[in-house]
Amino acid sequence: MLEILIGIIVSFFAGIVIGYILLREIVKREFSVELKERIEQEKEKIKKETLERSRSTLKGKISEQLAPLLPGFEYNASDARFIGTPIDYIIFDGYSNLEGGDKINIIFLEVKSGKSRTNKAEEAVRDAVLNKRVEYKVLKLEY
């Protein structure tokens, strides 16, 4: 009788151990499949976001270069000089119609579109202009 009881107890615990091992493997497989699916979803999401940012950046770059030709550009396109970095344009306002003693205004222009904001380099240029840290020099080369 004791042997039967011990056999039942051992079988019971063996069943629990085997059940635990099988259940653990099933959970691992399910988790692995869910994890792989989640990783693929995240990869697709990152690809879409990256592509959208790339498109947005490209649109911004194109807009920067075409700004003098677009409505809302308040200066004569002939007076605009595209620099690109650290500032988009230097406008020599009045240059194309310059006569005799006329004066021109010089404008540092940064073009932004969408949600883009100025970066540190652009802000440094802005600060230099606002704080009148701007000079005019002539470099004479001797040959």
Image (cartoon, rainbow, N blue to C red):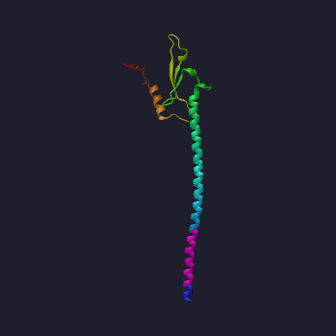
Can you see residue 92?
yes
Q: Quadrant of the N terminus?
A: bottom right
Q: Which residue is pictured at 58% across the width and 46% down the height? A: 47
Instruction: Give the vertical position of 92 relative to 119 (above or below).
Output: above
x then y, percent, for residue 73:
59, 25
Q: Which residues are magenta?
A: 6-23
Q: Residue furthest front?
A: 143
x then y, percent, for residue 16:
56, 75
Q: Residue furthest right?
A: 71
Q: Which residue is pictured at 54% across the width and 84% down the height? A: 6
x then y, percent, for residue 20:
56, 71
Main secondary structure along the magenta-highlighted residues: helix
The quadrant holding residue 23 is bottom right
Q: Is residue 25 magenta?
A: no
| Count of picture labels | 0
Instruction: Give the vertical position of 41 relative to 4 (above or below).
Output: above
Can you see residue 114?
no
Q: Quadrant of the C terminus?
A: top left
Q: Which residue is pictured at 56% across the width and 29% down the height? A: 65
The quadrant holding residue 3 is bottom right
The quadrant holding residue 56 is top right
Q: Which residue is pictured at 57% across the width and 61% down the height? A: 32
Instruction: Give the vertical position of 118 relative to 105 (above or below).
Output: below
Q: Residue furthest left?
A: 142
x then y, percent, for residue 66:
58, 28
Q: Is residue 20 magenta?
A: yes
Q: Residue furthest top?
A: 100
Instruction: Give the vertical position of 41 relative to 23 (above or below).
Output: above
Q: In this orientation, which residue lies closer to the viewer: 53 or 125? A: 53
